[in-house]
Image (cartoon, helix red, strand yellow):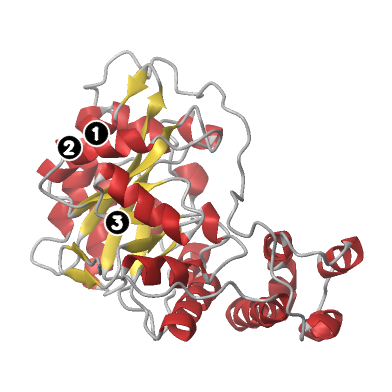
Amino acid sequence: MAVALQIGSIQLDSPVVLAPMAGVTNLAFRTLCREQELQRTGTVSGLYVCEMITARALVERNEKTMRMIEFGPQENPRSMQLYTVDPEYTYRAAKMIVDENLADHIDMNFGCPVPKVTRRGGGAALPYKRRLFANIVRAAVRATEGTDIPVTVKFRVGIDDDHHTHLDAGRIAATEGAAAVALHGRTAAQRYSGSARWDEIARLKEQVADVPVLGNGDIFKATDARAMMDQTGCDGVVVGRGCLGRPWLFAELSAELRGEPIPDEPTFGEVTDIILRHTELLAAQEGEDHACRDIRKHIGWYLRGFPVGGELRSSLSRVKSIAQMRELLAPWRESTEKAAEADSPRGRQGSPGKVTLPDGWLDDPEDDTVPQGAEVMHSGG
């Protein structure tokens, strides 16, 4: 049975969203994912979100940030995620997006568990401060009033198991005018370890009935998306680590959720073409030297599960030109090998750990003081 998703004015033919990932979901990768969905299913039906952008850096027109917010001519809707801790800069950034027609959708990130972010009160630490969180969401919604640009909010279960914030965050976001909310089913303390707690997504869906609730965490294959929606009642899925080295995953997810046959996993020969295309797209965006450095982090993900040996992996990880990459991959272009356990968990996992917070952060959840220095350090995106 087909499943669509409405987020404010945006109608999606499938409820699948690409999660922003720093250094990954740039214009080249988003283009590649869209191309793969189109080639394998005949349509582009999901939502592809750009890398996280710092609200203050956008307002200050930081050079790196302004390059990061570039969208391709075929990207529709254009989806931008903001990292923010300050209602004033949130309003100014959202108003800039409206006035300069920079995007069609604004998502806000309150889920980052990285210590350098939480220790200053940003990311997954911020929803604990309920009034500050409400002020920030309200500022973005106020800046987009009278437009077709919906504001959505993404967050985690909480700081740790003693400080769950997701139910309050969901209710607050919906009350302040968010068009949808998304929950990563882990606490900040879990980081990316263990299993995502889909039961918490179900609890959020029970509490927030006025706007769509999206689930995030442990979507590695097409049937995972269907399972999450069936088990939690959520309205859509947000996919991050599962698409690393598998930009064709969105074709599989969308087809499954539309009730269509799931496209076959690509052969290694097909994957070599995808690697080359990815590198060419990166080169078009940032130049060949940068592309050859940037693609290196993707190589291990692309080759996972293929019995190609260490020599090819090592050579590709040192590639310096597209011509060299084409030469290295040439002997494999006709390979019909399929990856073993292609849909198993991938990406960073790590271990759980204590969340680093500003001094006294947990003393008063109603304190709406803007944390100092939490945006300056992230200027540039």
Q: Residue at x 17, y 57 (%)?
A: 143
User: Does 45 appear above or below 183?
Assistant: below
* Pointer 1 local density, CA inside 10 Å: few below 14, some 14–19, many at least 20: some
Query: What is the C-alpha distance between the residues marked 3 and 2?
Result: 15 Å
Disc 2 marks which residue? 206
- Going by the numbered disc 2, the residue's amino acid type is Glu
| Res. 55 visible in picture | no
Asked where in the image residue 303 lies, by quadrant, the reply is bottom right
N-terminal-most mark, 3 or 2: 2
User: Does 118 appear above or below 299?
Assistant: above
Q: Position of residue 228 (x, y in %)?
A: 35, 48
Do the residues bearing badges 2 and 1 touch, measured as CB atoms within 8 Å?
Answer: yes
Tell me the tag on residue 203. Answer: 1
Disc 3 marks which residue? 236
| Res. 9 visible in picture | yes
Asked where in the image residue 297 lies, by quadrant, the reply is bottom right
Q: Position of residue 154 (x, y in %)?
A: 33, 46
Query: What is the C-alpha distance between the residues marked 2 and 1?
Result: 5 Å
> Is residue 2 left or right of 185 when viewed as pictured?
left
The front one of 343 and 108 is 343
The front one of 229 and 89 is 229
